[in-house]
Structures are given as structure tokens and as C-alpha cells.
Amino acid sequence: MRVIERKTVVERVTTQLREPTVQECVRRVLASPRACREVVNGLNSRAEHGGIESGEHAATVAAARRLSLALAFPGFRPRR
């Protein structure tokens, strides 16, 4: 009869997922032409169907207007 002693080491690895910050999301979207297009198309669709409330999304509407002017008139700097 032989006695064999065996030691087993068990290592536990845990992963904690966290929500990305707004800045991380913005960087990711801006790095992708497709993601940029999807955001613009989504905003356009909501605006066409009345889904962008002027009060709650006033800053978004103002930003969209500045973008529209910048695209129409390169170099033009509207007041903020």
C-alpha cells in the first residue's frame, strides 16, 4: 500500500464589470464613422417624430444647430 499526498491550489479570479463613462462612450463613437452616423440618424429620426423635447434636450438641439452651421459654412464660428 502506498500513500500519495496531492495538494491542489485553487485560484479564484473575479471580474468586476463597470459601466463606461460618458467620455469613454463619446471617444468610442467619435472613433467610428458608422457609430457617428447612427447617432446622427437616431437624433434626426427622433426630431422628426417629436422625440426631442426642447426643454430637456435644449443643449442637444443647440449643439446640433452648431454642427449644422459648421457643416454648411466651414470656418464659421457661431456664438455659444
Image: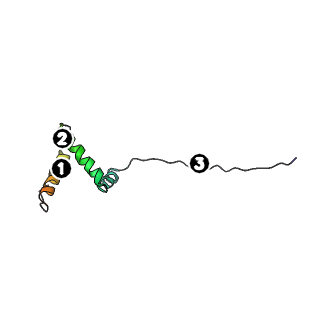
Q: Residue at x 12, y 56 (%)?
A: 72
Q: Amino acid at mark 1?
A: Ala
Q: Which residue is mark 2?
A: 47
Q: Position of residue 54 (x, y in %)?
A: 16, 41
Q: Position of residue 37 (x, y in %)?
A: 25, 50
Q: Which residue is mark 3?
A: 12
Residue in front for this viewpoint, 26 or 58:
26
The reply to whether dot 1 and dot 2 touch (C-beta < 8 Å) is yes
Q: Amino acid at mark 2?
A: Ala
Of the image marks 1 and 2, the number of the one nearer the N terminus: 2
Q: Nearer the viewer, mark 3 or mark 2?
A: 2
Q: Is residue 79 left or right of residue 16?
A: left
Q: Secondary structure at mark 3?
A: loop
Q: Amino acid at mark 3?
A: Arg
Of the image marks 3 and 2, the number of the one nearer the N terminus: 3
Q: Which residue is mark 1?
A: 64
Q: Nearer the viewer, mark 3 or mark 1?
A: 1
Q: Position of residue 2 (x, y in %)?
A: 85, 48
The answer to whether one can see residue 73 in this image is: yes
Q: Residue at x 32, y 50 (%)?
A: 22
Mark 2: give few (<14), some (14-19) or many (20+) Cα within 10 Å. Answer: some
